Image: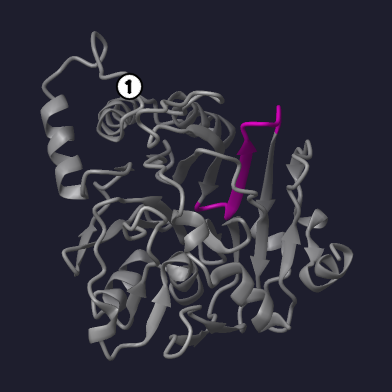
Amino acid sequence: MKKAIFSLALSAAVACSSLPADACTRILYETGTKSFMIGRTMDWMVDPGTDLWSFPKGMKRDGGAGQGAIKWTAKHGSVVSSFYNLATVDGMNDAGLVANVLYLVEADYGDAAKSKKPKLSIGAWAQYALDNFGTVAEAVSALQKEPFVLIAPDLPDGNKAGAHLALADASGDSAIFEYLNGKLVIHHGAQYRVMTNSPSYDQQLAVETYWKDVDGEKFLPGTARSADRFARMSWNLNAAAKEKDPRLATATTFSLIRAISVPLGIADPERPNIASTIWRTVSDLGAKRYYFESAYSPSIFWVDLDQLKLEPGAKPMKLDLSGKPILSGEVSGKFMDAEAFRFLSK
């Protein structure tokens, strides 16, 4: 049953890539005590029905790519945000590693049919990292060997699904993983603190270099375009105070990520890649605390990973966010057994 639930949660990338949405922003904020937080927006054309899931260590995994899919056993437990309960797009594990998946139209994973490597659905990419690695350096060392080939389905318009992956750990180390022209490109280093969508990350860095010579207090690009969001967030992040108080540090991270958000109801019919912010997360890597804020709710809630049942043999759990409940405070006690939840939903 556990394997079936896991496959349901991870086997399809179509749901997280089948809509024309070039959106989302991710930042790595350093506090005044040399601890780190990740802030992230999820911008989408419609509400993707996100729920939170907790997965214990020791689970048997399947890459969700059919015959020839890669298999592994989870070394770490995690809490994740799902897309339609079909893919992991955001989350943190019990070692304090955070994974964020953002859309990338330029992504090209190569021809999987020509590869003899095991296959991994793009919807399971983040979960594979959370399950297997405790630090960014560990992930880079393993993933640069390309132990699998990513499978990305065709979109309704005939284009390939695309995404890039960001990882960060409690030391402040950071890495961006992209597949361009069939080749894996890794940007590894604590300096890679901001990530949006298109263009590819090397070009995003070029955009940042250009805007460094502009006085951000007088002018910054203000549109919802990916490149503009990257420039605006880079300047704001560098200008933000490094707060020592944990509560102020959390508030600062939220203020930064809210400032880059797209208001509900904002859409451009001629440019469907501009979409409203549906939810935001902030991950406190040192405290192993995962904050979640829905754009439809007036409050923030969070999950302390040490309050979840992540030991081997524990069951997958789910926090149902359908109906847009108003939650606040620490909510680990509200997670329900996933098997029981499936029964209740019949």
Q: Is residue 310 magenta?
A: no
The x and y percentages for residue 345 are: 84, 62
Quadrant of the rendered image containing residue 280: top right
Task: Report if residue 93 is visible in the image.
Answer: yes
Farthest residue to the front: give it: 157
- Where 230 falls versus 111 (above or below)? above
Left or right, residue 244 beside residue 110 = right
Quadrant of the rendered image containing residue 177: bottom left
The x and y percentages for residue 13 are: 47, 64
Q: Residue at x 61, y 68 (%)?
A: 9
Task: Report if residue 27 is visible in the image.
Answer: no
The x and y percentages for residue 85 are: 63, 61
For the residue pair 235 and 86, the one nearer the viewer reads as 86
Q: Which residues are magenta?
A: 285-299
Residue located beneath label 1 in the image = 223
- In which quadrant of the rendered image does the C terminus lie? bottom right
The x and y percentages for residue 182 are: 19, 69
Quadrant of the rendered image containing residue 313: bottom right
Q: Residue at x 30, y 75 (%)?
A: 143
Q: Is residue 286 magenta?
A: yes
Q: Label 1 sits on what residue type?
A: Thr
- Where 243 falls versus 101 (above or below)? above
> Dot 1 lies on which element?
loop
For the residue pair 107 and 156, the one nearer the viewer reads as 156
Left or right, residue 165 beside residue 277 = left
Left or right, residue 2 beside residue 26 = right
Dot 1 crowding, Cα within 10 Å, few <14, some 14–19, many 20+: few
Q: Residue at x 71, y 72 (%)?
A: 316
Q: Residue at x 30, y 26 (%)?
A: 232
- In which quadrant of the rendered image does the N terminus lie? bottom right
